[in-house]
Amino acid sequence: MKAVQVTGYGDVDKLEVREVPVPEPGKGEVLVKIKACAINNTEIWMREGAYGSGGESGWRPEGVDFPRIPGSDITGEIVALGSDVPQSMDGRNVVLFPFTSSGEEGEEHFSDDMSFIGSEYDGGYAEYVVWPAHLCYDMPLADHIESSVFTVSGLTGWHMVNQIQAKPGETVVVTGATGGVGSLNVQIAANVFGAKVIAIVGDLDAEQRMKELGASFVFSYKSESLATDILEANGGPVDAVLDVVGDALFDVSLEVLKKGGKFCISGSAGGQKTNFDFRTLYLKHITMYGSVLGTRQEFEQMLKAISERKIRPVIEKTFPLEHAGDAQKYFKEKGKVGKIVLLPPAEIK
């Protein structure tokens, strides 16, 4: 099969298109013919070695075993079954839950042995992938491309909104709102949990799109009066902030939070380190959450909401699998709205 492999830590020149054997499913596993694979920061940071605090690493601190096929947001058709897999699974169109773990139910993402597809396992930048049958779920939508854009971003977003326990009548600020996680945070907070959402974007050309997704107000992070804009729009401090930016908007986030407010972060594209005055935290009684992925129960809840059209796919562009390097470069550009998706050769229309 054709696959894109990461050959080591570094830039996009470490992505190589190769011919490799089609994997064979083992006990409890299935072979999935990949129809679409959306791109996430996860595989870019894995290639760059950015998850480690002191050196190169993958999702887990011990590092990646190269070469590795990246990609975690995978949809496809089950075309072969390993032993102990029900025959009824053959031919199913599925979306893959993105990691394995021995963690107890509700704490799967906490487990020390949590292993991610595309980092600890070969992933979706290929024509076929092997995965445990019990981690393959029926697609929430009929279209493979549309169903592929939710897995990591959607699970991350769902868990974030769940952690802050957003409610109708509350106001939630969403940073990085045009990105994969951000655009889903807007939809989940507004359309599933019923909160009022203030979306923070780069270019206000995205304002109408954000409002179509559920945002009540849209502001640019470039505004010199961003905190004032938020406070005036809401008529006072907000209940919670869902952040994927990090340092660049950290001070504003804490400034606009009410006493007893909640701050949840799942990314740091705008800076991984910040200066922090602890007095802000304790004098305002702020609760802070770090958030990565989520649970299988949350994944199932998310798929149900997608199938009910409460959450819609937001797709910026598709690329052929062989152009994965170009796709990752495009992913890092500013001004996009939604997800970038890779298509194997057979899926190019």
Image: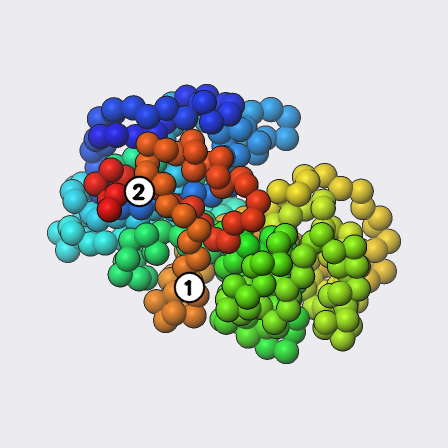
Residue labelled with disc 1: 312
Query: Is residue 17 at least partly visible in the picture?
Result: yes
Q: Residue furthest left?
A: 87
303 with respect to 349 (left or right): right
319 with respect to 129 (left or right): right
Contact check, label 2 and label 1, Cβ < 8 Å: no
Q: Tag 2: residue type? A: Leu
- Identity of the residue drawn at 37% across and 24% down: 16
- Identity of the residue drawn at 57% across and 45% down: 334
Q: Residue furthest bottom?
A: 169
Location of residue 5 in the rendering, given as x and y in whole percent from the top left corner: 36, 27
Q: Is residue 52 above or below residue 111?
A: above
- Identity of the residue drawn at 50% across and 66% down: 213
- Identity of the residue drawn at 43% across and 37% down: 327
Location of residue 279 in the rendering, given as x and y in whole percent from the top left corner: 86, 53
Q: Secondary structure at mark 1?
A: loop
Residue 194 has which mark?
none
Visual colour scheme? rainbow
Q: Earlier in the sequence, mark 2 or mark 1?
A: 1
Q: Residue furthest front?
A: 205
Query: Is residue 112 at least partly visible in the picture?
Result: no
Instruction: Out of 170 and 100, give the one closest to the viewer.
Output: 170
The quadrant of the rendering that contains the N terminus is top left
Location of residue 328 in the rendering, given as x and y in whole percent from the top left corner: 46, 36
Tell me if mark 1 has few (under 14), some (14-19) or many (20+) residues whose alpha carbon lies within 10 angstroms of its own: many
Residue 343 has which mark?
2
Total tally of numbered discs in the picture: 2
Location of residue 337 in the rendering, given as x and y in whole percent from the top left corner: 50, 53
Tell me the distance, in whole angstroms, between the alpha carbons under discs 2 and 1.
20 Å
